[in-house]
Image: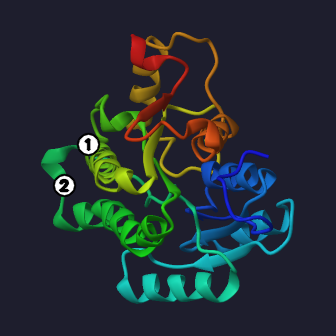
């Protein structure tokens, strides 16, 4: 079982933010299979999160709805976790992100950036709420799910890329700040996935252009899946990754080579 070292008999807890997404669901299933009791955060899609939780191996998994941009919801999330788990999360995975803004930068409105940058505020809120307990315990792992658009830019998807780039920068800075306490922070950056049927905004011209551009750069013929992302997250949460912090791991069929 690939879990973080812990006191004998104590079942570790993992919080998956955005667990109702395809990637989040796959990560929850991987961590539950590794022996974690999972807290599945969702913002709106409670029914899907409940279905995911019901299908996880093991018992005691918890669904916790919250708007991570709202301080009152963060407070309620923390109280919910404290009230339903014997142990505090030693793994936090952030998959949460609003529907990507699609449009040229010259047409961006303040409201569009406020919505997109909410993902950055949510990431900071998760750090503030859950990393201090990792520091106190001298162990823990945070994983942020980013994307190739944070560093490989594409027309019409600039706000999404900017928000993901900010999440990457914050996560790597966190690794510098908390590493001396034995706490690690890494980024997993998916490219396009083989099945995006549950992800919003992918049938637009901006994503079609992105597909055409990235296809020519991929070293491997196939696209990764949500399960591929989950396997990398599971590795990062395990003792096998004890020496890894501050990394950005691209999972994109070798697109970054081209």
Density class for disc 1 (Cα within 10 Å; few <14, some 14-19, many ≥20) is: many
Mark 1 or mark 2, which is nearer to you? Answer: 1
Residue 212: image location, x then y, percent: 44, 20
On the image, the x and y values in percent for residue 68 come to 43, 74
Q: Which residue bears the numbered disc 1?
A: 158
Indicate left or right for 116 with 91 as reference.
Answer: left
Q: Is residue 94 visible?
A: no
Is the C terminus in the top left, top right, bottom left or bottom right quadrant? top left
Res 15 seen here: yes
| CB contact under 8 Å: marks 1 and 2 | yes
Of the numbered discs in the image, which one, if any, rests on residue 74? none
Which residue in the protein does label 2 denote?
108
In the depicted view, which residue is nearer to us: 27 or 67? 27
Would residue 208 appear left or right of 241 to someone viewing this image?
left
Q: Which of marks 1 and 2 is nearer the N terminus?
A: 2
Q: What element carries label 2?
A: loop
């Amino acid at each position: 079982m690939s879990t973080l070292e812990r006191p004998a008999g104590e079942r570790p807890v993992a919080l998956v933010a955005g667990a109702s997404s395809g990637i989040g669901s796959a990560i929850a299933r991987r961590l539950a299979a590794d022996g974690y009791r999972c807290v599945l955060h969702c913002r709106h899609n409670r029914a899907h999160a409940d279905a995911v939780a019901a299908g996880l191996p093991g018992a005691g998994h918890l669904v916790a709805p919250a708007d991570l941009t709202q301080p009152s919801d963060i407070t309620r999330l923390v109280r919910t976790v404290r009230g339903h788990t014997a142990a505090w999360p030693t793994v936090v995975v952030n998959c949460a992100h609003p529907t990507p803004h699609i449009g040229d930068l010259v047409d961006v409105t303040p409201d569009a950036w406020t919505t997109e940058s909410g993902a950055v505020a949510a990431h900071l809120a998760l750090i503030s709420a859950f990393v201090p307990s990792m520091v106190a315990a001298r162990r823990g792992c945070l994983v942020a799910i980013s994307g190739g658009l944070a560093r490989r830019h594409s027309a019409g998807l600039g706000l999404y890329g900017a928000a993901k780039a900010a999440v990457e920068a914050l996560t790597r800075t966190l690794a510098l700040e908390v590493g001396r306490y034995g706490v690690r922070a890494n980024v997993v950056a998916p490219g396009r996935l083989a099945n995006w049927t549950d992800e919003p905004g992918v049938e637009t011209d901006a994503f079609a252009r992105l597909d055409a551009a990235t296809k020519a750069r991929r070293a491997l013929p196939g696209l990764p899946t949500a399960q591929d992302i989950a396997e990398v997250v599971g590795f990062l949460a395990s003792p096998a990754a004890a020496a890894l912090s501050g990394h950005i791991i691209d999972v994109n069929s070798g697109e970054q080579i081209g």
